[in-house]
Image (spheres, grey):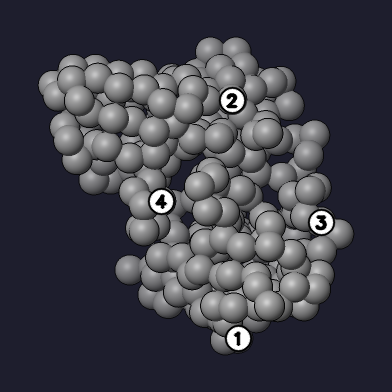
Amino acid sequence: QLQLQESGPGLVKPSETLSLTCTVSGASISRGSYYWVWIRQPPGKGLEWIGSISYSGTTYYSPSLKSRVTISVDTSNKEFALKVTSVTAADTAVYFCARMRGAAVAGKLSSYMDVWGKGTTVTVSS
Amino acid sequence: QSVLTQPPSVSAAPGQKVTVSCSGSNSNIGNNYVSWYQHLPGTAPKLLIYENDKRPSGIPDRFSGSKSGTSATLGITGLQTGDEADYYCGTWDTSLSAGVFGGGTKLTVL
């Protein structure tokens, strides 16, 4: 059974870089039609899609975060990572990693997150 | 401001039916499939509906989804107190080349 687990510092100082890793267990990270996604939820707010990566390294980023975000994948260690540079208090959130099914179905794009990690809280504060 | 628009809250009595709407545009809902998620605070979101109206294994048929044009709807029948949660719609936005969510709808079972 596929499981995802986020890990990384729970506290990051303003202007520094937030770094998180998601470890995949129970299934291959190199399976086609799946993407590996980062999503966050700031306190009191809704879910925000950050970006995704395929096992081959194809990335997509939210336009609002694109200039500060990098997502990478390490298939040998079955993990993918998130880096957010120049963080501010607005980056304080629960960060989730997830698996996203991405495929063209009958001419339309099907994208949905079927497996999620439990989430990890990151606070940006000095 | 979310790309997809949902009502902030809905409510209904136990046993009743409720619907949650999700409005978008041609670059997202109009030309791509919609998914729905249930999120209880402190837990991982759960996939309820994918490709507009399909339920993953283990999701009861009390949950249903539909789509028309640039809007989608989640329906929940036979409401239970355990259904109290936040519900989010999601899809791909072709213009943004990114995934997008609605702002979320808080369901209260009175």
At x 33%, y 40%, the residue is B85
Chain label for disc 2: B
Q: Quadrant of the N terminus of chain B?
A: top right
Q: Is residue B21 above or below residue A94?
A: above
| Residue matched to label 1 | A76
Between circles 2 and 1, the one closer to the viewer is 2
Q: Amino acid at mark 4?
A: Pro
At x 58%, y 70%, the residue is A123
Q: Secondary structure beneath disc 4?
A: loop
Asked if disc 2 and disc 3 are in contact, CB closer than 8 Å, the reply is: no
C-alpha distance separating marks 4 and 1 = 28 Å
Residue sitting at the far right: A67
Q: Secondary structure beneath disc 2?
A: loop
The circle on residue B45 is 4
Q: Earlier in the sequence, mark 2 or mark 4?
A: 2
- Camera-nearest residue between A69 and B30: A69
Q: Amino acid at mark 3?
A: Lys
C-alpha distance separating marks 3 and 1 = 26 Å
Q: Tell me whether marks 2 and 1 sit on the same chain.
A: no
Residue sitting at the far front: A126
Determine crowd level at label 2: few under 14, some 14-19, many 20+ residues with C-alpha closer than 10 A: some
Between circles 3 and 1, the one closer to the viewer is 3
- Camera-nearest residue between A121 and A82: A121
| Residue matched to label 2 | B5
Q: Tell me whether marks 2 and 3 sit on the same chain.
A: no
Asked if disc 2 and disc 1 are in contact, CB closer than 8 Å, the reply is: no
Between circles 4 and 1, the one closer to the viewer is 4
Q: Secondary structure beneath disc 3?
A: loop
C-alpha distance separating marks 2 and 3 = 23 Å
Q: Tell me whether marks 3 and 4 sit on the same chain.
A: no
Residue A68 drawn at (x, y percent): 82, 64
